[in-house]
Amino acid sequence: MTYTPFDLSGKVALVTGGNRGIGYGMVEALAQAGADVAIWGTNEERNAQAAAQLKDTGVKVFTRKVDVSNEQEVVDGMGETLKNLGRVDSVFANAGVGFGSPSFHDMDTETYRKTLGVNLDGVFWTLRESARHMVERSGKGDVGGSLVGVASLAAIEGAARNQAYAATKGAVISMIKGCAVEYGRYKVRANAILPGWIATDMTAGAQAGSAFAEKVIPRVPIRRWGEPADFGGMAVYLASDASAYHSGTTMIVDGGYSIF
């Protein structure tokens, strides 16, 4: 007898910031597992490129230009996603930005607000609209769903010169825990993913620097940068029936860095 919970046929997954980096690593695996996917991103060209790369999977792919720091764009984006794909079974609130500063005391308010706008407000609106849809489905006897917030190791470690970013990621964990408790009655689970040092556009500067190559990456027990594809299996698991009783957790994906 074949174990089939990881088959996502008939399910729909939404990934914000899904056209590159960790988001695309998730999207690709979700599609390969059979899920129809919705990709939200602020760059229409990259959205289209991501959709083209998924053509051979045979699933439905819907893309939309959405700036998650704009509430109305999130509301409209959810409406159009449901119109085109019919439902959303899992959502990965992954869109994020990283703006550091020479020091905490030199961090300007604009940087602080821009970081919160995407990393916290955007996650809040994305999860809120997704939860609303899942509750409405539940009222029609169609229960279940998965809410996932992409946080960061910065949420649980001291992130010098990056306090605004760290604060948003810590808040995502708290938001997810609240959702896990509130929506469990609808068979909707909620979990947070905490990436470590992952090779994406956001970390391009660090990847090019000798300091990381000599002092940081050697401290990763697996001895390499993480890659977007490393999040594919996690996404499929959280979108699948295999995770039906898994809720309220923080799932660290860092090659063992945080324990070494």
Image (tube, rainbow, N blue to C red):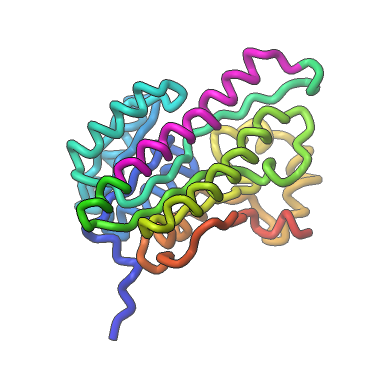
Q: Nearer the viewer, residue 194 or 75?
A: 75
Q: Nearer the viewer, residue 68 or 27?
A: 68
* Horizontal and vertical percent position of residue 5: 33, 70
Magenta span: predominant SS is: helix
Residue 124 within the magenta-colored segment of the rendering? yes
Q: Is residue 54 visible?
A: no
Does 256 appear above or below 110?
Answer: below
* Horizontal and vertical percent position of residue 107: 74, 17
Residue at the farthest bottom position:
1
Q: If the image is split into quadrants, where does the C terminus sit? A: bottom right
Point out the stretch of residues depicted in magenta.
107-134
Q: Quadrant of residue 207?
A: top right
Does 21 appear above or below 44?
Answer: below
Q: Is 170 placed left or right of 107 in the picture?
A: left
Residue displayed at 43% across by 40% down: 127
Residue displayed at 54% across by 33% down: 201
Q: Nearer the viewer, residue 17 or 163?
A: 163
Residue displayed at 36% across by 33% down: 40
Q: Is 95 placed left or right of 110 in the picture?
A: left
Does 179 appear above or below 39?
Answer: below
Q: Nearer the viewer, residue 7 or 246?
A: 246
Figure disc tally: 0
Q: If the image is split into quadrants, where does the N terminus sit? A: bottom left
Q: Quadrant of residue 16?
A: top left
* Horizontal and vertical percent position of residue 148: 46, 48
Residue 33 within the magenta-colored segment of the rendering? no
* Horizontal and vertical percent position of residue 10: 21, 57
Residue displayed at 72% across by 30% down: 163
Does 118 appear above or below 11?
Answer: above
Q: Is residue 52 visible?
A: yes
